[in-house]
Structures are given as C-alpha cells and as structure tokens.
Image: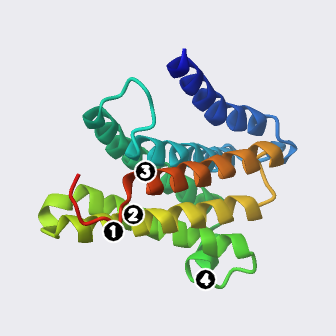
Amino acid sequence: MRSIVIWAVLGTAVTVPIIASAFSPYLAWRDPIYILAGFAGIIGMCLLLMQPLLAGRWLPGLSPVTSRHWHRWCGLALIAAIVTHVTGLWITSPPDVVDALLFVSATPFSAWGVIAMWTGFAAALMGVLRQRLRLRFLVWRLGHVTLAIATILGSVAHALLIEGTMEIITKIALCGLVILASVGTLARLRVWEVRRR
C-alpha cells in the first residue's frame, strides 16, 4: 500500500503541472516550436524531481542498482529536455537567447536558466566520464553533487521568476518538491562522508 501511495503521489506531482500548463492562456497564438520549447522546460523540471529521488533510492520497488541505472538515464533525458528548450527558444527568438548566454538579458530569470544549463551539462559530463576522469570517489561525488545542487537551485529560481506557461500554484508546488527531495537525499546519503558506499 505504501509503495502504491508513493508512486501515485509522484505521478500526480509530475503530471498535474504539465496538464495545468496545457490550459495556459499564454499558449494562445504561440508558434508550435515555442510551445514545444516551453513544455520541454516543464518536463525538465519534472525530471529534476526524479533525479534526487532516484539518487537517494527513495522509490519503492527499485533496487539500488536499478535506481542508479535510471538516475543516469533520467540525467540524459534532462539534458535532452534542456537542449530542446534552449534550441526552441533560439529558433523563435535568437536575440533573446544570445543576450541570455552573454548574461546581458534584462530579465533576471535568464541568467539563472543559463547557470542551470551549464552546471547541468557539467554534472552530466562528470557522470558519463566518471571512470575516465580517474578522480578519487569522494572528489568525484562532491563535484557531481555540487554541480547538481547548482543546477537545481538555478532551475528553481529560473522557473519561479518566469511568468509564463506554467500555472503558478503547481509550479510552486513542483519547485518545492524538487528542493525537498534534494535536501532529503543530501541528508540521507551524507555526501560529505569519506567512506565509500
């Protein structure tokens, strides 16, 4: 019963914001590419909730090996969502994307989005190249977690500052769950400990 409740809550947490966004008045008269870019960002936030839950092995029915496996695939899906989000915005409004990348945009949420994008790429790269980097496990883990935290905080700030497609209540709830899951996982895994798990 507990497992069913946890999966049901998680399913609700990731589907309700997407459904609510589909009814947003901001979608009226928007190009399909712009809409795709917006929903890629929303899906990215949902995947960002999954990442700490998988890393912390919170989800019932998944073994540690399976959780780690899905954490990697979810990370790659997150990168794909980010790339789709930015590419779609580039196609619809290149000057805005250039300003954001150069940190000269007049909108504060742009800088947070760019920071989250680059730290997300770096965290994923560390995950993919873990064996080739030949770093001590503690160094690798602290580096990966630090980049992940920066990605989460940047993404949450980016989402909360935007007045756009996402419905405000579900957006705040999703961002709150992302932070809560991340803090819980950091406490559970004690990433600062030297002992390898």
Identify the element where label 4 is drawn: loop
Q: Up-down: is 15 above or below 102?
A: above
Residue type highlighted by circle 4: Phe
Of discs 2 and 3, which sits in the foreground?
3
Q: To which quarter of the image does residue 20 belong?
A: top right
- Mark 1 to mark 3 CA distance (whole Å): 15 Å
Q: To which quarter of the image does residue 70 belong?
A: top left
Viewer-side residue, 169 vs 111? 169
Kindly identify which numbered label has been placed on residue 145.
2
N-terminal-most mark, 4 or 1: 4
- Mark 4 to mark 2 CA distance (whole Å): 25 Å
User: How far across and how far down the image is residue 108, in percent?
Assistant: 72, 76
Q: From where the camera sits, is residue 131 visible?
A: yes
Residue at 44% in and 62% down = 148
N-terminal-most mark, 4 or 2: 4
Mark 4 closeness class: few <14, some 14–19, many ≥20 residues within 10 Å:
some
- Mark 4 to mark 3 CA distance (whole Å): 36 Å
